[in-house]
Amino acid sequence: MKIETFDRDDHQKLITAEIDPEAMEQFKVQAARKISSQAKIPGFRPGKVPYDIVRRTYGDRAIQEEALTIMLEKIYPDVIKEAGITPYGPGQLQEMLQVDPPKFSFIVPLAPVVELGDYKSIRKEHVNPVITDEKIDDVLRRLQRRSAVSQTVDRPAAEGDLVNLTISAKLATPIEDADPVLIPEGVRQMIAGDPRDFTDEDGNEWPFTGFSAHLLGVTAGEEKTIEYTFPDNSSNDDLNGKEAVFNLKVNTVSSLELHPLDDEFAQSIDSSYENLEALRKGIRDSMQSEETNRYNNSYMESLIEMVVKDATVQYPPVALQDEIDHVISHFEENLNRDQMDLETYLKTRQTTREDFIEKEVKPVAERNLKRNLVLEEFSIRENIQITPEEVQMIRNMAENQARQDPSLKNLARGGVSKQQVADNVARSTINQVFNQRMMNRLRDIAAGKADAPAVEEGPETVDAAAEPVVETAEAEPAADVIDNVSEEPTQAAE
């Protein structure tokens, strides 16, 4: 067999293979035997028909086509081995270049190649978030308002009044074929002159900065139109510089009688709090945990982006297509939970499947694929792994939990076997342990401790009670872990 390989610019190889005529004759004999085993020829048992009889009955073309199929199945592994390449997956027969002697060309996708940059030089300080008294006061203020006594008033809204309004908004000059609606008509309750209840963690007021000030002085029954131009540095890039029209109808204006911030108020919120100071401490502890988790996620995300940005990744088209299929599958699962299918979703978006994939799914899939490949290479380079003994320990823990945890026992009674539940708890735990070890290593590197011994999180430190995905699955260490840090197209592209 003669082999030639040619590089392509899409991380695939073009391979030509020329087969010896003698070998081809042997494949024809096998082909005739296979044809005869599936045929009914009078006077012969299946599989026992002489070659010449098969040839006269079915013709040279049928034998040759079957011979080619058999040959490709048998010689393809030899072609790959002789070409000295590592394929990503099965290759495709491109064309038959000649018949005698048989010569074929294959296109073979190559395994992805990742070249990490100088990731050990990345640095980023880790600073735990601080919960200020002001943040606690904001929470107490919201609790006060939630338990306040409201009284409808017949006067213009003053600062701190509750305004019930019907609001809608649309772009003043929408792009052709784009949906102009920014806010579908609906009822909201907002505080006049105080934006804090409608301000996100980055300080962005909804629906735009300064909106709550427009509620000062409004009266019940009043209709109001507000024209607003979003700044060029808007929190939503799609709205940068866009003009919008907001239509308001004030339904009611109410004053709020707030409960004094005292021990009685604390106990009305939760009887487990003895006094106001205990409530403040409970709020601080809860906020500290939440803010720390949010900060840690953001911090680790930034480290991952540094590693990914400096890496060079090559992969074949089929790898990207696999990731596109993966993203769409997950997106459809999310839609199904909302009682919607992809076709209906695309109709609501007034777009086609092709455009949706090209403009929204493909960019996400490209980011996911590069990110996953980089993190996989990082874990290999840093020798991050879970030992067989740890895997067995996790399996034992998961099986015990499936037997004892009431929520998981109920899940099992719902038609899912205890073994399925245990397998999925184990799989989830393995992913969590692996990810935690990888994140710990990244954090050490960012702190300048790349040469320090790694401190590994053991299985016993991970909450294995995370709600499992109910499917039969074998627990595997590294390969599936990276899926947990992948993106999906959001329904806000909705």
Image: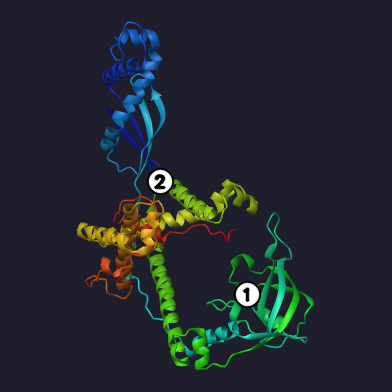
Observer-nearest residue: 109 or 486?
Answer: 486
Image coordinates of residue 214 in percent, x first then y, are 72, 81
2 or 1: tag closer to the N-terminus: 1
Mark on residue 489? none
Q: Is residue 472 left or right of residue 259?
A: left
- Can residue 366 be seen in the rendering of this structure? yes
User: Against 250, is 184 above or below?
Assistant: above
- To which residue does mark 2 refer? 316
Q: Quadrant of residue 295?
A: bottom left
**Does 355 sit left or right of 309 as displayed?**
right
Going by the numbered disc 1, the residue's amino acid type is Trp
* Vertical placement of residue 120 versus 421, above or below: below
Q: Which residue is mark 1?
A: 206
What colouring does the structure picture have? rainbow
Q: Residue at x 59, y 90 (%)?
A: 259
Identify the element where label 1 is drawn: loop
Residue 133: give x, y in percent of width and height.
48, 90
* Amino acid type, mark 2: Pro
Quarter of the rendering occupied by the N terminus: top left
Closest to the observer: 379 or 297? 297
| Residue located 56% across and 79% down the image | 203
Q: Quadrant of the C terminus?
A: bottom right
Q: Secondary structure at mark 2?
A: loop
- How packed mark 2 is, by other alpha carbons closer than 10 Å (few <14, some 14-19, many 20 or more), is many
